[in-house]
Amino acid sequence: MALMSIDSLTVQQRLFNASLEIHEGEVLGLIGPNGAGKSTLLNAITGLIPRSGRISLNGQDLEQLDSLQRARQIALQPQFIESVWALTVHDIVSMGRLPWGDCDQSIIRAVMQQANITDFADRHVNELSGGERARVWLARVLANQPVLLLVDEPVANLDIHYQQEVMQILVDYARTGYAVVIAIHDLSLAARYCDRLCLMDKGRTVKTDTIEAVLNSEILSPVFNVDVYVDLDNQPPVVLAQ
Amino acid sequence: MERFLNPALLLLLLMVAILSLDIGILDVEVGSALIEWSSSSLSGEALTREALIVGEIRLPRTLLALIVGAAMGISGAALQGLLRNPLVDPGLIGASQGAALGAALVFYFNLFSGLGALATPIAGLIGAALTLFILMGLSGSMARPAIIIMAGLAISTLSSALLAVVLNFAPNPYAMQELVFWLLGSVSNRGLDNLAVLLPAFVIGSAMLLTQRKLLLGLSLGEQVADSMGLEVTRRGRYIVLGTALLVGSSVAVAGNIGFIGLVVPHLIRPLVGYRPDRLLLPSALVGAIVVLVADMLVRQLPPERELKLGVLTALIGAPFFVWLVWKERQRWL
C-alpha cells in the first residue's frame, strides 16, 4: 500500500506539477537536472511553501494535520544546514525530538549509535569534519522517527567513504518499515541504494518506476541534455555522462 | 554547573538589590526603614527621614533598575536567537526610538499634564505601541524575521528623524536640556508609580518570550529546519517581536535609553548555558538586572551636581565590549 500518494501537487509562482506514490519500506530516489524541482517537491510535501493539490499520508489528507502532527510524521533534512551557535552533537540530535516535546534519551542514544557519532557526543558540531557533521544532521532527523524521511542531497560534498556510510544509514532506516525519499544528483549511487526512482524535469514528475525502467540512456539523455552511459549489470552500477 | 546557574544568579541579584537599597550618602538601617515605610504608607502616618529615603527614593530606583535591566537582557537574548545573529540589539525593532519620540512630545507639547510624573512613561509606551503597529503593517502578515528587522530599521530611522525635529524646535533651552538628559537614560527621581507602566509590560513581554523557547532552539539550525519541525517560524516569531517591543518600549518609556545591555549580556551568559538559545533567556534577564543595578550604584557614587547618567555609563562600558565582539567575529571569518 502507498504510504503517501501525491496527486497533481502544484506550488505558487512556479511551473510545477507532481504526482507520485511513495511506498512503505522503500528508498525512493528523486533525480533530475538542477532546477528540475526536486527541492521544491520536498519543501512542498513538508508544507514549507504554499501548495495545492492532494497529498495523503496513510490515507489521511495532509491538510488535516496541524504543523506539529505533520512534523512528527514527516521530517526534512535540507541540503544546506548549519548551526549558528556552538551547540554540542548531543544537543543537535536531541532537537529531533522537538516535534514530540520530549527528550527521549533511549531514542537519542540509539540513533547516535546508528549514525556512529556517540564518540563525539559532547563536542561542538562546528568543530567536526564535513563527513562527521553529515551524520550528525542525519541523526537529528532519525531521532524524530518520522514515517516519511525526506533528505535533500545528503551526500553532496562528502568523500566516497562517507557517501556510502550515509546512504547505508538511510537504507537501514527505510527497511525498518518507514520510507525515505532522497533528492540525489549522483545517479550511480541512486542506482545502487534506491529501490525506485522518480525522474523530474522542468517542475514535473516525468517517470516514477524501477531503477531499470528509469535509468536508461533513452530517457536520461534528453532530460539531462547529455549522452548518458548506463551499466546496471556492473557491481556497483555505473551511470555517467559520456 | 548549569543547574546552579539560575539559583546562583538569583542569589547574587538579591544581594546586589539589598546593597542598592543600602548605599547612599545617609547611613540607614534598610530593614527597619522599609518596615517603617510600608506601615506608615498603609496607615497614612508621616514618614521619618530614613523611611522616606529608603522607601521613596532608593526602593523605586532599585526596582526600576532591576526590571529595566532584566527586560533589556531577556529581550536581547530572545531577539539574537530569533535573528540567529549575536550582534543584534533589541533596539533594532524600532520600539525604543518610538518610545523616545512619544516621551519627547510630552516635553514639547506638555501632553497628558493631568497624569503628572506618569505622563512621560505613558506617552513613551504609546509611542512604542504606535511604532509596533506601523512595524506590523509594514512587514506584512507573512513576514520572515529578516523583513521585520528591515521594517524596524526603517521605522527607527523615521522616529529618530522626527525626534531630531522635536529637538530642533524645542520651545526653550530648558525643555531641550530636560529632554536630552531624559533621553540619556536614568532611573533616578522616578516614583514607584512608574511600576504601573513597567511591571505589566514586563510580565506580559517576558511571558511571551519564555513561551517561545522551543522556537529559539529550533532556529539554531535555520528557519527551514525550524519550520519543518512544526515550529511555525512566521507566526511564533511575531510573539518574540511583540514581547521584545513591549519590554524595550516600556523600559525606554520609563528610564530613557539604557543601551548595550541587551547586546552584551547574552554574550556573557552563552558559554555558561552551552550556547543553548532556549536556556539563555532567564539568566540573561538576571544578569541584565545585576549589571544595571551595579551600574546605577556606580553612578550614585559621583557627586549629585556632576551626575553621570546611567545610560551614558552603560554605553561607556558596552561600546568597547561591542568593538571587541566585532573584532572576535572578524577573526572567525578570516
Image (spheres, coloured by chain):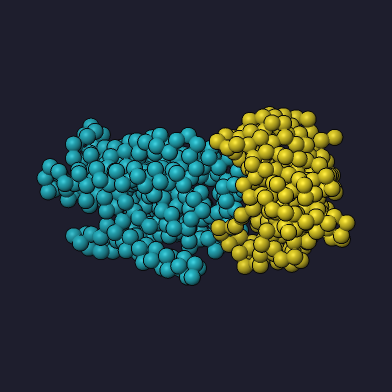
Chain colours: A yellow, B cyan
Question: x, y (%) of residue A165?
Answer: 78, 61
- Whether residue A3 is situated above or below residue A89 in the rendered picture: above
Is B311 positioned to the left or the right of A104 in the image? left
- Whether residue B168 is situated above or below residue A233 in the rendered picture: above
Quarter of the figure with residue A128? bottom right
Residue name at image x 73 percent, y 59 percent: A242
Question: x, y (%) of residue B7?
Answer: 55, 57
Foreground of the two, B83 or A161: A161
- Whether residue B272 is situated above or below residue B178 in the rendered picture: below
Residue name at image x 56 percent, y 59 percent: A85
Question: x, y (%) of residue B260?
Answer: 38, 57
Residue name at image x 29 percent, y 59 percent: B312
Foreground of the two, B27 or B259: B259
Foreground of the two, B153 or B217: B153
Mark count:
0
Is A208 positioned to the left or the right of B127 in the image? right
Question: x, y (%) of residue A70?
Answer: 69, 37
Foreground of the two, A145 or B143: B143
Q: Is residue A64 visible?
A: yes
Image quadrant containing the N terminus of chain B: bottom right
Q: Is residue A98 visible?
A: no
Quarter of the figure with residue A156? bottom right
Residue name at image x 85 percent, y 35 percent: A1
